[in-house]
Image (cartoon, coloured by chain):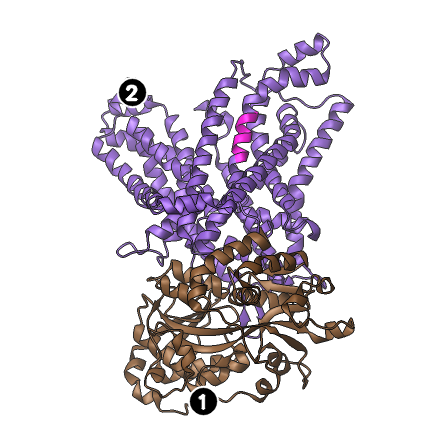
Amino acid sequence: MDGAGARVNRLPRRLLIALAVGPTVGLAVFYVWPFVTLVVEAVDATVIADTLGRSSTWEVVWFTAWQAVVSTVMTIAVGMAPAYVLARYDFRGRSVLVGLLTAMFVLPTVVMGAAILALLPDSLDRTVWAVIGAHVVFNLAVVVRVVGSLWEHLPTDMEAAAATLGASRWKVATQISAPLVRPAVTAAATIVFLFTFTSYGVIRILAAPGTRTIEVEVWRRATQLGDIGAAAVLALLQLVVLIAIVSWSTVAQRRHAQAIGLEPTSARRRPQTVGERRFVTLIAGSAVLVAGAPLVALVVRSFSTPTGWSTAAWTGLGRTEIRPGIRVGVDPVEAVVNSLGNALWATSFAVVIGASASLAIVGAGRAGRALDGGLMLPLATSAVTIGFGMLITFDTSPVDWRASWWLVPVGHALIAVPFVVRTCVGVLRSVDPAMGTAAATLGASSIRAWWATLVPYLWRPLAVGAALAAAISLGEFGATSFLSRSGGETMPIAIEQLLGRTGSILQAQGFVLATLLAATTVILVVVVERLRPTEAERAER
Amino acid sequence: MATIFVVVAGACGSDDDAASSSTDVAATADSITLVTYDSFPEADTSLNDALAEFSADTGIDVEILVAGDTGTMLSKAALTAGNPEGDVMWGIDNTLLSRAITDDVFEPYLAAPITDGSVDIDPAFLDLVPNGEATPVDYGDVCVNYDLAWFAERDLEPPTTFADLVDPAYAGQLVVQNPATSSPGLAFLLATIHEYGLEGWQDYWSQLGANGVEVVDGWTEAYYERFTWAGGGPTPMVVSYGSSPPAEVIFADPARNDAPTGVIEDTCFRQVEFAGVLRGTDAPDAARQLIDFLVSDRFQRELALNLFVYPTNAAVDLPQEFIDFAVVPESSRAIDPAVIDAERSRWIDEWTELVLG
């Protein structure tokens, strides 16, 4: 946004402030304040000493770390082959496979937990291996996308040269390719580690009752034991670890960054030899199996009862009676209604806040970047911490908002706004400032020029952002598990409660809800992919 | 809707004159929410009929909100103290009462019929609420129950003591509730602490764990989903109530005249349940009226056959099945509430490490 055009197009300060005030106040009230409250509540020497002095704390930290490391290593190990195949080869069904892996990544955590639960034999249920399996399937898309996007544009001439000089395939892979993709692998590993380190929904559904990551322990201490102080200390401890890891990864990526000329277009080609064709088929086939089987199992389990196939769980959704008059206290049908209502409001909040934030960010210089960074913060904070902070902050008059219907959608919006902002800002930045200059030259006021040249470009990214926000709201579990009240359970909460029961009809109803939620999420992702400008369109602009 | 509005039964013949004395309340047509645990029936029982009569008489609709097991319900209430999910809470027991009081969950209120002496109640119950923080509404004993037929089929003598439960002969046969989320679970943990002492219970639970004890979150799940007799589950022993056997006789289909389940008297722990006005309710008057009704003869006489607990109202007669089949242990275990209050969270922590960790 440098140059004469930008200066001519500079918006009046008042308009920028008006645009920025909503997002800023929202962030301050619903993120910064709860977060500060959490820190203040925790900064009490005895609670810190008590919590850190308890051996169970370190057992939880240790478990959190090792399951995250194992999950990350396994995800990378499993993901490299499909990443390579998808980056280097064109084959029929390639886009379907990419879509499938992406869909797995955006599935709500509880749905992924439910799907793995549905797939695994009973003997593996409630074990740490089930958890790690879920983490691998979940995060395959990260490896495929992050590593694959580099691999795809990596020049093949070095590998070809090495092969010509007589290097074996293995030697080419280890000596040439591996160092080149290493920064991408580090980046992917960091992302996977962060996701699995803060794993919550998957653990709540899949792990045995005593299995706890820090995230689960925060929830358990706060809501089951009423031990707010220890929960806050744990939430902060987790944050410290996350910051350390992100810093390390940034440094590591910079150190291993190498100047390589990336090809602007992809080097994908169709597999040529029989060996290549077999290799591609094997890898792509396995990837489809790994990603698809849990989804199929989910649907299958929603129709299965101990006495055979039945649509009872679908048609009788909401019949949760155990004995006459006695119900489990969670109504699946009501959960669907609650989730839809929450998603509607969360999406509205996120779109309004995200749109004005995006316009402010693009229009303002340094202050805009600060706002941009600020709005990303909730994404870096665990959802459990956000929900917990909000619960203990908004509990006294005049801000006793615990019973307010809008608190849950606001929590969801907080997590969704960064996605809306990211989709919008990119598009807005790419609008040629010359258009604004032209408008101004033709006599339009700066606001008119802005409105006529920039705002029309906003609708499509906003639609993408809205779909993402809806998907996030429908699947959100961490913050909701703190903020939802009895009778206000959302679909993910209901899924967790129903799958935690042993009654077969209750379980089947949990799988019905998970199937519905998975289908909705996949539809939203398809909408997003359709609406996103293609590479060709982007080049045009 | 998970919550059922108890419909005011217009034609329902009221046998007392409460209706006329509270017409002013009826005019405001209040609706209040009774927050309760998940084994409290939401509809279709005589207990709900009694609540419908209350609504007909007073014009106060009672909506029932199930908030999970007692421990979960209390945790939610503590986090929402002052801005509660309902107006009256039913079912906080003596093992958790002190936490409810510390967390300021209740607006102190002791039912007026108890205060004015029109309802007769054992003073021992009132000692638990010296400042009238809440109203004692029922009591019972938490004991290990067993499936008589299951043991008979295997020619196995059911256990009779805590020590028996760690005998390999009974491996994998007991399901208990998590004391962090369930009040019978906590009561059972306290019973073991009472038996083995502050230094010995951990070792006992290690042995129970080694003997394959199963842990679930709540009573409803344990009894109706895991227990061989009531739930068709795999586990022939369950932590439940001394009054569970008569329940099995009453609900037997086809009818039977002997109890299919037994009680290990040695394991029984006394539990007293309370109802209280939730602090922050916007209908405190209606909430108090409901508490008064909860100790009335009309409501208390329904407790035995619906919740399988004993009424605290001493004037209420027990059904014959109860007299015949319920087990009231000669000496029920109890631990000083002050000690429970001071140690509960540490015990639960240690238990979690030991059994789930």
Name chain A's colour.
purple
Q: Residue at the top extreme?
A: A165
Q: Quadrant of residue A385?
A: top left
**Left or right, residue A278 beside residue A234:** right
The total number of labels drawn is 2
Mark 1 — on which chain does it sit?
B
What residue does disc 2 label? A5
First to last magenta residue range: A185-193
B255 lies above or below A424: below
Question: Which chain is brown in the rendering?
Answer: B
Instruction: Mark 2: give few (<14), some (14-19) or many (20+) Cα within 10 Å.
Output: some
Instruction: Mark 1: give few (<14), some (14-19) or many (20+) Cα within 10 Å.
Output: some
Q: Which element type, helix, strand or loop, lies under badge 2?
A: helix
What's the residue type where badge 1 is placed?
Ala
Q: In which quarter of the image is residue A363?
A: top left
| Main secondary-structure element of the magenta-colored stretch | helix
Q: Does the magenta stretch include residue A187?
A: yes
Residue visible at 64% across and 23% down? Answer: A88
**Left or right, residue A155 beside residue A345:** right
Q: Which one is nearer the viewer's eye here, A514 or A122?
A: A122
In the rendered image, residues at marks 1 and 2 fall on the same chain: no
Residue visible at 62% across and 56% down? Answer: B206
Q: Can residue A413 be seen in this view?
A: no
Mark 2 — on which chain does it sit?
A
User: Which disc, if any, is residue B315?
Assistant: 1
Residue visible at 35% across and 45% down? Answer: A44
Q: Tell me the distance, in whole angstroms, between the alpha carbons under discs 1 and 2.
A: 89 Å
B110 lies above or below A316: below
Residue visible at 38% across and 72% down? Answer: B276
